[in-house]
Structures are given as structure tokens and as C-alpha cells.
């Protein structure tokens, strides 16, 4: 598959770059001017990654913007690895449960929920905006499992509707499924299986520490008793989470998403 290098944007440095001497081109759509986006399209940046996050409680020790911060950071890494993709602004408003009566994460303060129909309408509107600008592949990466079915169904509907245009839409399955798959297996191999749950557990907290430790109340967590469901932690034990453990999962997510998107690009070109 052909790889594009986008020289007009090389001076716009990514906030994720390790140092100025080896900085990657800016890949965030929201940090570019319209003329830079136009030039990126002309230079072959015809893939756009749409990170889907969510604003929800994650126990007493992880900030409610967890999914948004992770989706942005990983989206940037994925785009930089691909070399021909930009990253859309994160979608932070997603279905998180009913508001009347309050269900799921909406039972806790700090959660924002929208109806599923509003969510899928938002995805369709955003994707169509990118298509008409000239992006040929729109890829959704979802950081939260609760809306994954609706997100991937919407991508399939868009892909079918766009058949005559030559544009495509898809969701990256590997980005999400690797967390409960290969990453969970890696943690179990380290003897940490009992600490793995489904939400705000060891793996969730470690992933957040690897991306942005300021989002985790580490001091309070280390001093806490094992948190449970009443505090919004669903299984496992987050107290032994580390950034080192999280980097294992983050690297797996990036690798899986890059493989998914390269395969999609190869089929669409």
C-alpha cells in the first residue's frame, strides 16, 4: 500500500511528539486550518479517524473524561503510525443509560447520556461531513463497549449508502476487542487475573495511567480499601495498576487499529 508523507504540515508539531527534533506532523483535524486540511487531502491524507469516547463515572479514582482523553491520544498515535490519516474531534456524548429512571452509569453523578438515535445521527452527520470534503475512508474507533454495536452498525449503513461514491466507512474492531482479549491475557500471564474486572478495574486504570496519569487519583487509590460496585468499580481491583502495565495494552490497541485501517485502505484503493 502506498504511504503518503505530508510535508506541508511538517512544521505543525504534535503535542505527542517526544521532542522537537523528531516531531511528527500535526494530525488533529481541530488544530489545522481549512487550507491545511485541503492541502492534506491533496497530499493523500484521505483517511479520517473518528475517536468515540464518552463521559461517565469510572469509580472514585478515575476522572469522568477517561474515554475522551484516551481516544484522542490513541487516535493521534494511530494516525501518526499510518502516515496518511487525520483525527477528527472526539465524540464525547454517547448513550450511557436512561435518565428517567436513572440506569447504568447514569446512576452516578458525572455521567452524560444521550439517546441512541441522537448518537447514531451524530455519527452519520459527522461522517457525511468528512465524505463531502474528500475523505475516502472514515473509521470509527470506540473506547467504550456500551455503544459499540450501534457504532459499527452505523458504519456499515454508511458504507452501503456510499457504495456509488467510492467512499467507505468502517469501525475498528481490534481497537476495542484487544483490551478484553490479548491485553487481558497478558495481565493474567503476570498473575493479575483476579484484578481484572469490567470497568474501572486494574486494566482500565493502568491504561489511563499510561496515557495521562493526572486523570487518576493515585494517592487516594493506593490508600483505599478495595472498591466495589457501589462505588462504580465493576469487578477486579484497581489498586495495583501501573503505567507500565497500561503501556502494554495501549501498544496493543494502536497496533490492532493500525492493522485494521491498513487492511481497509488496501481494499478501498
Image (tube, rainbow, N blue to C red):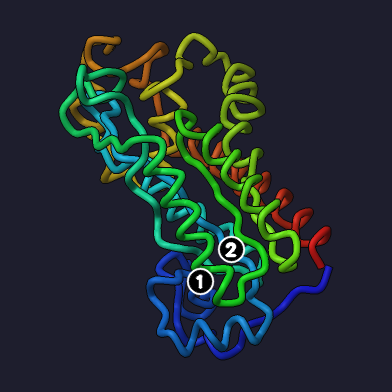
Mark 1 — residue? 27
Return the x and y of residue 231 as percentages of the image width and height.
22, 15
- Please determine whether, in this image, residue 4 is positioned above or below residue 188: below
Report the disc number at residue 12: none
Q: Position of residue 63 (x, y in %)?
A: 25, 38
Q: Residues within 10 Å of mark 2 (few under 14, many from 20)?
A: many
Query: In the image, what residue occupies the spot 45% across and 71% down?
Result: 29
Q: Is residue 62 left or right of residue 238?
A: left
Residue placed most toward the observer, 146 or 200: 146
- The x and y percentages for residue 86 are 54, 69
Say which residue appears at 57% left-offset and 22% top-offset: 187
Q: Are marks 2 and 1 in contact (CB under 8 Å)?
A: yes
Splitting the image into 4 quarters, where does residue 44 fall?
bottom right
Residue at left offset 29%, top offset 43%: 65
First in sequence, mark 2 or 1: give its number: 1
Q: Is the residue marked by circle 1 packed among few (<14), some (14-19), or many (20+) residues within 10 Å?
A: many
Q: Nearer the viewer, residue 127 or 186?
A: 127
Res 2 → quadrant: bottom right
Q: Dividing the image into 4 quarters, which one contains the C terminus?
A: bottom right
Q: Secondary structure at mark 1?
A: loop
Q: Quadrant of residue 103?
A: top left
Q: Is residue 256 above or below residue 43?
A: above
Please give the count of numbered marks on the rendered protein.
2
Q: Secondary structure at mark 2?
A: helix
Q: CA distance from mark 2 to mark 1?
A: 7 Å
Q: Residue at x 70, y 51 (%)?
A: 160
Position of the N terminus, as image quadrant, is bottom right
Which disc number belongs to residue 79?
Answer: 2
Q: Position of residue 241 (x, y in %)?
A: 40, 27
Figure check: 41 above or below 173: below
Amino acid at each position: 500500500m502506498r504511504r503518503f508523507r505530508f510535508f506541508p504540515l511538517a512544521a505543525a508539531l504534535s503535542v505527542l511528539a517526544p521532542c522537537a527534533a523528531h516531531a511528527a506532523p500535526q494530525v488533529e483535524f481541530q488544530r489545522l486550518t481549512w487550507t491545511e486540511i485541503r492541502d492534506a487531502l491533496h497530499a493523500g491524507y484521505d483517511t479520517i479517524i473518528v475517536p468515540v469516547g464518552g463521559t461517565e463515572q469510572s469509580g472514585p479514582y478515575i476522572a469522568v473524561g477517561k474515554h475522551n482523553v484516551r481516544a484522542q491520544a490513541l487516535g493521534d498515535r494511530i494516525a501518526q503510525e499510518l502516515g496518511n490519516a487525520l483525527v477528527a474531534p472526539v465524540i464525547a456524548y454517547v448513550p450511557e443509560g436512561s435518565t428517567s429512571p436513572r440506569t447504568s452509569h447514569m446512576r452516578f453523578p458525572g455521567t452524560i447520556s444521550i439517546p441512541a438515535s441522537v448518537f447514531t445521527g451524530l455519527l452519520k452527520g459527522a461522517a457525511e461531513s468528512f465524505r463531502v470534503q474528500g475523505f475516502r475512508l472514515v473509521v470509527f474507533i470506540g473506547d467504550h463497549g456500551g455503544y459499540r454495536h450501534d457504532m459499527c452498525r452505523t458504519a456499515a449503513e454508511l458504507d452501503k449508502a456510499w457504495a456509488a461514491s467510492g467512499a467507505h466507512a468502517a469501525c475498528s474492531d481490534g481497537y476495542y476487542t484487544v483490551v478484553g482479549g490479548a491485553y487481558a491475557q497478558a495481565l493474567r500471564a503476570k498473575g493479575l487475573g483476579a484484578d481484572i474486572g469490567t470497568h474501572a478495574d486494574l486494566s482500565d486504570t493502568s491504561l489511563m495511567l499510561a496515557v495521562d496519569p493526572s486523570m487518576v487519583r493515585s494517592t487516594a487509590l493506593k490508600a483505599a480499601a478495595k472498591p466495589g460496585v457501589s462505588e462504580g468499580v465493576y469487578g477486579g481491583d484497581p489498586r495495583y495498576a501501573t503505567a507500565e502495565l497500561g503501556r502494554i495494552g495501549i501498544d496493543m490497541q494502536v497496533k490492532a487499529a493500525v492493522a485494521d485501517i491498513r487492511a481497509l485502505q488496501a481494499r478501498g484503493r
